[in-house]
Amino acid sequence: MTSFNSTMLIEDDTINATLSKRLLERFLITNGIFIVPNGEEALKFIVNYDPDFNTCPELIFLDIDMPVMDGYSFLESFEELTFLNKEKVQIVMLTNSNRPEDVTRCKEYGVKFFLNKPLTEDKVKNLLEALNKRIEQ
C-alpha cells in the first residue's frame, strides 16, 4: 500500500476536516495529517513545510468553495510553485459540488481524483487503490 510523507486537508468546515482526518488516520497511510482552512493558508504551509522547499505533503485533499482563497485559486498558485518531487503530489478534490463543470475544470488543472463529501471508508479504499495503480505505472 502506498504511504505518503504527509497529508494536507484544505477545508474550511472544521467538522468535515476533523471527521476526514480521523478516517484517514485509521488507514495508517501517512506520517502526519495537517488541516488548513483555505488555499492561502495551504500555500503558506507548503512553502514553509520544508525549510529547503524540497517537498510538501504528497497527498492533498482540496475543497472547492472556501473563503479567502478557493480551490481553483489554490490550484493556479500551486502550478506556479517549483520544488523537488512536485510530481509526487497527488491532489484530490473533496467537495460538496455535484456540478459537472467542476469535474471538467479540475481535470484542466491536472487533478485526477474528484470525491464528493463526506469522505467515507469505501471512498478512501477506492482512492487508495486508484493511487496505487497510478503510482505503480
Image (cartoon, grey):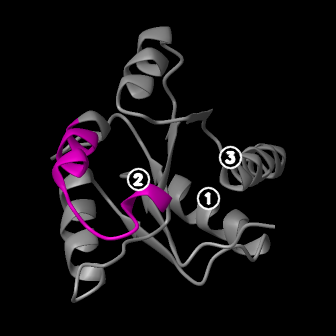
Q: Residue at x 15, y 47 (%)?
A: 68
Give the residue type that dot 3 points to. Answer: Arg
Q: Residue furthest front?
A: 137
* Of pointers 2 and 1, the one earlier in the residue sequence: 2
Q: Relative to residue 17, is residue 4 drawn left or right?
A: right
**Closer to the camera, 128 or 32?**
128
Which is nearer the N-term, disc 3 or disc 1? 1
Q: Are marks 3 and 1 in contact (CB under 8 Å)?
A: no
Residue stretch rendered in magenta on the structure: 73-88
Mark closer to the observer (3, 1):
3
* Amino acid type, mark 2: Glu
- Give the left or right position of residue 32, taking residue 44 as reference: right
Position of 15 compared to 127: left or right?
left
Q: Mark number for residue 134? A: 3
- Label 1 sits on residue: 20
Q: Position of residue 55 (x, y in %)?
A: 36, 75
Would you call the spot at circle 3 few (<14 residues within 10 Å), some (14-19), or many (20 or more)? few
Is label 3 in a helix, a strand or a loop? helix
| Main SS, magenta residues | helix
Q: Are marks 2 and 1 in contact (CB under 8 Å)?
A: yes
| Amino acid at the residue labelled 1 | Ser
| In magenta stretch: residue 49 | no
Residue linked to disc 2: 11
> On the picture, is 73 further left or further right than 85?
left
